[in-house]
Amino acid sequence: MTLVKTSYNRRSFLKTTTMAGGGLVLGFSWLASCKPEVQQQQVAEMPKEWFDLNGYLKIGDNGMVTIMSPNPEIGQNVKTSMPMIVAEELDVDWKDVIVKQAPLNTEIFSRQLAGGSQSIRQGWESLRMAGATAKHMLVAAAAQEWQVPASEITVSNGEISHKASGKRAHFGEMASAAAQLTVPEEVKLKEHKDFTIIGTSRKNVDGKKIVTGQPLYGLDVQKEGMLIAMIAHPPAFGMQLKSFDAEEAKSMPGIKDVFQMKTFEDDYNMSAFDNTAFKNLVVVVGETTWQVMQAKKALKVEWEQSPTQEAKMQIFGREMNVRFPEGLEGTEGHNETLAQQGKITQEVARKDGDPEAMFKKAAKIIERSYSCPFLAHNCMEPMNFFADVKADEATLIGPIQTPEIMEQSVSARLGLPLEKIDIQMTRMGGGFGRRLYGHFLTEAGVISQKMKSPIKLVYTREDDMSMGVYRPAYHAYYRAALDANNNLIAFHVRAGGIPESPLAANRFPAGAVDHYLAENWTVDSNITVGAFRAPRSNFIAGAEQSFLDEVAEAAGKDPIDFRLELLKKAQEKPVGENNDYEADRYAGVLELVRDKANWGQEKAGMHRGVSAYFCHNSYVAQVLDITMKDDKPTVEKVTAAIDCGIVVNPDAAKNLAEGGAVDGIGHAMYSGLTFKDGAPEQSNFDKYRLIRHSEAPKEIETYFVENGIDPTGLGEPPFPPIMGALANALYKATGTRHYHQPFITEKQVVG
C-alpha cells in the first residue's frame, strides 16, 4: 500500500460529534494535493477556529455516509465521480452513500472550479486521503473499544470486523468514538488492483431528478418575493448606450423599475473571468418573465459607436491591458484579415534547426491554409442567476463554473466583505466554458442591491447569443517539405486569430522533425471571446491532423503509419527540450485505435478518416467511418482510443467521449457565427445550425488505455481531434479536401 503523509495538512482536517445520536463529521481541505512547501505556506494562513464545516464526509449513527461534492457540475459527472474516490478509500458500500453539492467555501477547498478538465486530476490525492483518513479513525476506534490490534481489523462495505474475536460493527457504531481521536500523521492508500468502486460504472446521482424534472438548475430557483430582471444591451459590438426612454415600459403591468446599470465601475481591475463587452446596460425589473419581456420590447434606446477602449485585467496574477478597437466589425473583413495575416512572417514561437534551408532544397512542398469562424456556446440553459443582496450580506444562487473567483468580483462590486457573500452552486444546463465568465452573476447582484429585493436575472436565447462570450475566429497556415525519398524534412506552422492565437508551438509534430518553425500572431477585436470546450485545441487539432493526412498522402504513406513513424523519432531521438507530450502514450492510442477499428479492412462503400491529438494531459485517437447516399455523408461509426489514466466511472467516461465526438462533428460540419456591422447574424437556433439527432454517429465505440497512471483530463480531449477525422473521411468519400469550417457551407474565402 502507499503511505501518504497528512502532517502538512492535519489542521485542515476537522472532526465533530454534533450529530444527534453521535456520529463523525470529517472536514477536509484540498491543500492535501499541494506540494509540501505550498501546503506549509497556506496552512499557516488558516484560521484557528472553524465554524462552518462545508467540505466533509459525514458518517451517521445508522452507518449512512454523506459525501460533499466540491466542484461545480456541468454535466461532466464529477458530482458522482469525486465522491466515488472518497468512498473507495473509505470502503463504504456505495448504496449507503448520499451525495450533496458542497457550497462555496474557499477556506476548505482550493479549487472549486469547473474548467480545464482538471476536477478529477486535481482532487485525486486529497479525495483519496479524506476517505482513507476517516477509515483509519474508524478502525482505531474499533481497536480501542475491542482491545485488539488495529492491524488485525478489516473493513469492507461499511463494516468493521475482527476475525479472531468475531466482533463486527458498522461505521455508524464507531463514528462517535472515532470523532474523539486525533487525525493520523499518515494514512495508507489502496493499491490500484484493490479498487472496488473506482473503475466500476455508477449511475449519475442526479439522474432520476433530471429525468423527472425536479428543480436542480438555476432557472428552477424560486424564492418568496422574487422579481424577474432582464437587460437590454447594445445591438452590435463596438456600440454603447447613449440614452433611453423608459416611460412606456414603466407604465406596463407588473413592471417595478427600469434603470441604467454599470456591471463594473470604470476603475475596476477586472479578472479574466469578468470578461464582457457591454458594461452599461438598461435593466427592466418586474413581477413575471412575460411582463418583463414585453416591457423590454417597449424600451426606446439610442446607441452610439464606442471609441477605442483599454481595460486593465488580472489574468492569473498577471496584469494586462486589453484593447478593444473602435469600429463595427464583420465576417467579410475578418476573413480578409485572417488570409492576409496568414501570409505574413510573424513572431517566432519556436524554431528547431534550419527550416528555411530545408524548404529551399525540398523535392516537394505542401502548403495549405485552414480557418474557422466564431462560435457561440449555446448552452441548453441560458445565463441566469438569483441574487438577494441586503445591506450587510448577499446570497447568490445559480449556474457558475468559477464561483470562488466570482465571489471576489461580487464582493468588490457590491462593497461587501468576502465572508458576507454566499454563492450557492446549482447544476448547470451546459457550460462548455461560457459559464467561466460570470458577469451575469455580478449583474444580478447589482440589480438586487439597487432594487432592495431578491431578483432572478434571466437572459433570453437572443441575449445569450448576441452578448458573447465566443470561441475566436482562427487561421492556420502550414507548410511541409519532403525530400526525394518522401521523408518529412521540415515543418512550418503559422497560426493566429481574432483576437487570440490557437498555436501550441511545443506539441506534435514539434520534437519529431529536425527542422521546425512555429509562428504566432493575433489581431485585436471588440468582440468578446473566451474559453470554448478545449480552448484553441478545438481548431488547431483538426487543422493539423487534416494537414498531416495530406502530407502522408503526398509521401505515399498510410496516415497512421506516417504518424507512428514521426512519433517513433520523437521517442528515440526527440528534437528540442520543451515538447509537451509523451510520444509513447501518443503512439499507444494510435496503435490501439488502429487495432480496434480494423484499420485497412474497410468494407466496400465505407470511407475512413483518422486523427489523434494531445491536450489537457490526455491522448485521444479517433477513426471515423462515413458512407455516402445521394451525395450526402452519413457518419456510421466512430472508434476512439483514449489514454486519460485511471478511469473512475467508465460509463460516465464513455458519455464524455461520445458527447465530445458528437459535439465536434456538429461544430466542424454545421456551426458558425457571422457578423455584419458588429452584429451577430445568428441570434437563435432558426439561423444558428447545430447537429441534429439524425446526423450524429450511428455507433460510437470507446476504448481506454489501462496503464495505472493517475487520472488526467477527459471532459475536453475527445472534442478536438474528431474534426480532423471528419475532414479526412470526407476527403476519402468525396475527393474534396475541407479547409474552412463549417464544412457544409464552406466557401473558399480565406486564403
Image: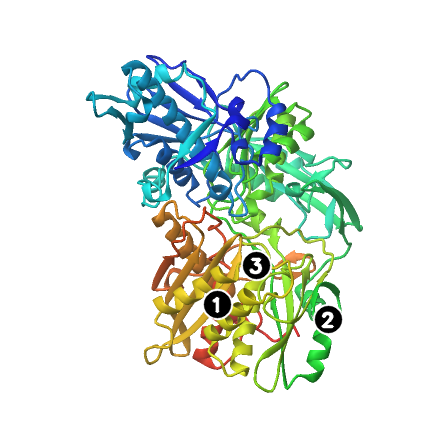
Front residue (pair 16, 674)? 16
Residue identifier under label 1: 611
Residue identifier under label 3: 537
Q: Residue at x 71, y 70 (%)?
A: 336
Q: Secondary structure at mark 1?
A: strand
Residue 444 visible in rendering: no
Q: Is residue 272 above or below residue 330?
A: above
The Cα–Cα distance between marks 3 and 1, rounded to whole angstroms, is 13 Å
Q: Residue at x 32, y 12 (%)?
A: 21
Residue 43, percent from left and from top = 59, 26
The Cα–Cα distance between marks 2 and 1, rounded to whole angstroms, is 28 Å
Marks 3 and 1 close (CB-CB < 8 Å) = no
Q: Is residue 421 above or below residue 399?
A: above
Q: Residue at x 37, y 63 (%)?
A: 694
Specify the amino acid type for callout 1: Ser
Q: Residue at x 46, y 78 (%)?
A: 558
Residue 293, percent from left and from top = 55, 41
Disc 3 crowd rating (10 Å Cα; few below 14, some 14-19, many 20+) is: many
Residue 316, percent from left and from top = 67, 42
- Closer to viewer: mark 3 or mark 2: 3
